[in-house]
Every structure is written in C-alpha cells, then in structure tokens.
Image: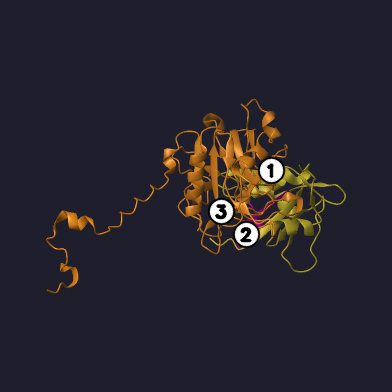
Chain colours: A yellow, B orange
Amino acid sequence: MSYELRVTVACPHAKTADANQLALVLGESVADGESFAAANWQDAAGNRYAVMSAACEPSFANAATRPLAAPSFAPDADVQAATRAQAALVVWSGAGQAPKATPETITAYFHPNGPEALEMMGLTPVEEELV
Amino acid sequence: MTFVGTSIGVGMGAAASAAVPVAPPPPPPAPAFDPTTLGAGVALTRFNDAAMYQDAAGTTLAGIGEPVGYIADLTGNGLHFTQATASKRPLLRADASGNRYLEFDAVDDFIELRGVEAHGIHQLGMAANFDTTSRAMNFMHATQSRYVALVNDNDTGTAINYAVGTTGAFWRVSGAAYLYGVATRDDLYEATRGKNTLVAQFDTPAPYAGFGVGVGTYGASWAFSGKLYGLLATTDVALPGTVLAEIEAWWQEAMQ
C-alpha cells in the first residue's frame, strides 16, 4: 500500500472521546479507539488538545468524509459519536489559509511534517521539565 | 642438467620440502553471532525485511514506507515489540545504503515491549553514535564514538520508559524523548540508571534503567524525529560486556 500522505489532527480535550470513536470506525482494530490520548498540547489561550499524526493512503481523505458505519471488528462502536467528530472536522490540505486549532473544531492538516503542522495550527507542547 | 618449473625438488625427501616456506592456513571465521544463544530475559532484534510487520499480530510484512506494528524478537523468547494503534506506528525506511530503520513522527509514534515483568527485563537499549556538529546521528559511525541515550526520566510517559498499563508492564519507545550524549556504554548506563522516576511509582524491583539510541535529529521540545535501527531489552545483569560487544558488532554487520 502507498502511504504517501500524512494527516495530523488536533482534537480539543472535550471532543477526545468522539474523535476516538471516529478513529475506531475508520481504523483497522479496536486499538485505534485509543488514537487520541493525553491532551498535552495547547493553544495561545491555554486550551488543551490531544494530537495524533499518521501516514495514510491517498484514499483516506475520502474515507473520512463518507457516511460512517461500525466496522466488523467493533460492532459496538459509537457511530453517533463518530459522526459528531466527523461534523467537527476542519480539514486543510494545503490550499488557502491554514485554519488554527480551536476548542470547537477538530483540526486536520494534510502536511508532510507532523510537528510543523501542529505549529501551524498554533499549538505548542505543554512544557515538561527537562533535565 | 636443466630443471624447469616445478620439477625442482621432486623426490628430494621430507627434509628438503620443510625448507620451503608455507603460509599458515587462515584462521577459521568467527562463528556468526546467534541471538538464540542469549537465553531467557532478553529481547533482541535488528531491523530487516524479515523482522518488520505492519500489523501488531505480525502477519503482514512491512515494506519500505509502510507502518510497522510488530518487530520480531530474534532470540526465540517471544518478546516482540508492538504497536496496536495504527496511527502510532513508526514507518519503515531505508537509508542511502539500504539499511532499514524506523522513522518516528515526533508526535505520537511509539513501539512497546509488553510482558517484561514476567521476564525481569530492566533495560532497553541500542548502540549508535551521533555527530555533535550537525546533531545528525550515525549508527556506529567510524569517527564519531559517542553513545546517545534516549530516555524519559520524568513521568510524562511519552518517551522511553517502563510503566504498568492495563495489560501489564511494558517498555515504550516513542518519538518524544530526552537525549543524552555520553562517551561510553558504561556512561550511557550511568546516565540513565535510575532516572526513570515513573518506575518508582510502581512496586517493581530496582534498578530500572532504560536507554535507547537512535539515529537522527532532535529539535523543539527535545522531540526525537530520528532513525532507530535495532532494539535490545535485557535484565540488569544478564549480558556481560563481551556479549554486548558481540551484539554491537552484529548490529554493525547489518548496517554497513
């Protein structure tokens, strides 16, 4: 398979559960329901986000926007929650002005570099103590 | 009388033959290092096409540019490194020499070794060198002899660390870690020994020293976005220095 694209997603902390259901529905195993973990990135206002970044096939963009259904490996997936997350998606593929991450949207960039994409979204990692 | 060619000496007896210098036979080649001789409590791999799989179950081989969800432990101990979540899998790459390495995205990629409690594994490491000028690290570089430790020594759970999850204890290697440049393997060990305070939160035997070494660069927030060529996990005392040296040579052999 061809993993030519990279998608990087910033999910507001409050939408993490919905976003994980979307990742589960679009994924390949139940473990994909854990795609968004700790909200350890933040915007200038201090709003926290969980982030993910993954190489993906070109067909991913279409798959992410089509009507959703529970996959065979997770028949109990919460499709309603996944659909809410899908409705909150703001996708930027490089054309026009890049949207910033906001607490109301789940922001996704198709960009070859994950950390750069997060920086363009206006996010910084929550500082951790360095030795 | 004329003697021509090799006819000289024929029939002159053993004493005359002994006077002709004869090169000693070359020593037999050193036996190839065999990971299966390491015994229990050790996980070891080097990255090649036969050891890397896309899925965490280890059923679909990974090609160049594809995600890696399973790296086979070559010791026979069954301690395989895995990543079940598709978006968190590093990518298999090949450098200019064709060497395979793992590329982490410095956002959320990592691989794990689970079940280490049962095997008493306390260390996780690799050996490599890095260029202090460019901060590009080169595996076993001929003129750069610094080891680089990649460790997590607080409780973020995002770098190399030992932790206890819902399915048991595991080691984790991810794209966000702290790097230490040290001079020798012993220094590397000392630099990382006991730094993982996360471990102290659990009722597990001390010391737990985790170290790993990659090849690549690090940048903002010390996020590691480098290349990883091999993995070793072992107990604190399982491997003497001579064996570690053998492992390093074995890694190096595959990375020319």
In which image quadrant can residue A98 be found?
bottom right
**Which residue has dot 2 on it?**
A60
Camera-near label (2 vs 1) is: 1
Q: Residue A117: horizontal and vertical position, in percent?
A: 74, 59
How many numbered badges does the structure rendering display?
3
* Chain under disc 1: B
Q: Which residues are magenta?
A: A51-68
The structure residue drawn at horizontal position 62% and vertical position 59%, both measured from the top left corner, is A60
Letter of the chain that mark 2 sits on in the rendering = A
Q: Report the amino acid beneath label 1.
A: Thr
- The reply to whether residue A77 is visible in this rendering is no
Q: Is residue A91 toward the left or the right of residue A72 in the image?
A: right
Residues at discs 2 and 1 both on one chain: no
Crowdedness of circle 3 by 10 Å Cα count: few (<14), some, many (20+)? many
Q: Which residue is mark 1?
A: B158
Image point 64% across, 25% down: which residue? B203
Secondary structure type for disc 1: loop
Q: Quadrant of residue A94?
A: bottom right
Circle 3 SS class: loop
